Amino acid sequence: MNISSVDQRFKPVLAWIVCLAAGLFFSYELMQFHMLNAISSMLLKDLHMSATQFGVLGSTYLLADVIFLLPAGIILDRFSPRKVILTALFICILGTLGFSLSTTFFQACLSHFLSGIGNAFCFLSCMIFVSRWFPLQKQAFVIGVIVTLGMLGGVVAQAPFSYLAHHVTWRSAVLIDGAVGLFLFLLIFFVVKNAPQNHKQEASVKTHSFWKDLTSCFYNRQTLLCGLYTGCTNLPLMVIGAAWGSLFLYHVHAIALSKASFIAGMICMGTIVGSSLCGFLSDYMGKRKLLMLVGALSSLIIMVLIMTIQHASIPMMTTLFFLLGLSSSTQVLSYPLIAENTPSHLTGTSMSIAAVIIMGLAAIAQLLSGQLMDLSWNRLIVNGSPIYQAKDFMNCFMMFPIGLILASFSLIWIKESKSPTEVVSY
């Protein structure tokens, strides 16, 4: 189908179809990342891992992100986003299938690393599709919807995936996950199309100024600050939701693992509700910073409550985890701010630089999380699984209030949203 010949009446519908289909890849990648939380106890026992090793396993996914994000942005600015997203998904599927067959810690890390390579391209690809298919005044809402769709993968990776793993073993569950990826590959192959604009001609013109453009992106303070805000606000989701939430609820509050994985999934559920809501409110108000400040401060209060409340009930923790995801979803507002202050042909590169900061902070947090927990661990092991106490989790969780305070202060130097006539489009 020739996209340029599509009737303009159907272009908005096609734009939504393309971006939502691409967003399914983002959802699939978040499932690969968050499923470790659902099967954490099984992995610790089956692969004989400590908390430090489990933290390293989770960080390999994010390390791949950090390594490949900048190349991903450059590639997406210069090549077909459709071809890029299909290649990245294929690599992710290989990593998922490899993870299901892993019998050693090294094999699991290598396979999880491959899945992380796919993740380096998926969200940036979605941002490129949104920036090229939708006008600026609608982008925050569309990005919010895509993040909402992505978080559905995080929700599925919690209680539903935990239920499946307990009934068919975690290896079989991950193998089924790989089969879902193959189906998604076919869907994207037939549905996702590039935007009508002729970006190939653009790319040939700007090749000569590649290093100048790259340097300008690195020195764009708005990009760096927005990356810092999102990275710090995102830490609870990336560490608690993806790694330690279930074990924290199980060991500290004596909540059964099946229910604990459901509660941990509430962070993603809160983000699902909050992302679209924040995007809509931000586009309606024409402002970003006020909502971003409210989100960071609210997340700080909720995180302190999660850390300090003792003998919490299931409804209480379910509510707090949901509110944490809801309040931290203001992170999605950083992306339209970056797009507004970046030349259109460098959107992918600027997004990738911000994403390096976001995923880099998450990778460091994942890596440190296990080490901080093992710092005070009394080396108690029951039935092959290490047992951790409240003080061990508190050592780890202290990074979240610090990050949220830093996110709040970063807003002092972040510029407010521009009006459509002021947006950089050269």
Image: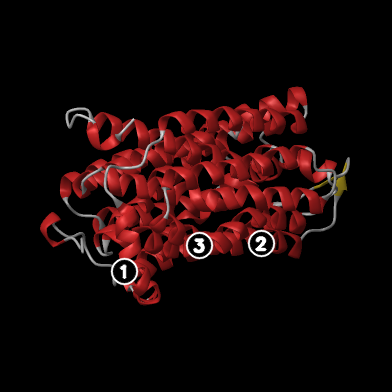
Identify the secondary structure beneath mark 1.
helix
- The label on residue 170 is none
Q: Which is more N-terminal, label 2 or label 1?
A: 1
User: Where does label 1 land, which residue?
Assistant: 222
Front-most of 185 and 138? Answer: 185
Question: Which-is-in-front pick, marks 1 and 3?
Answer: 3
Q: Nearer the viewer, residue 178 or 194?
A: 194
Is residue 398 at least partly visible in the picture? no
Disc 3 is placed on an element classified as helix
Q: Amino acid type of disc 1?
A: Gln
Give the residue pinned by disc 3: 71
Across and down, in percent, residue 40 comes to: 72, 42
Horizontal side of 136 relative to 352 (left or right) equals: left
Give residue 367's mark: 2
Q: Is residue 212 visible?
A: yes
Q: Closer to the camera: disc 1 or disc 2?
A: 1
| Residue at (25, 43) in percent of width and height | 134
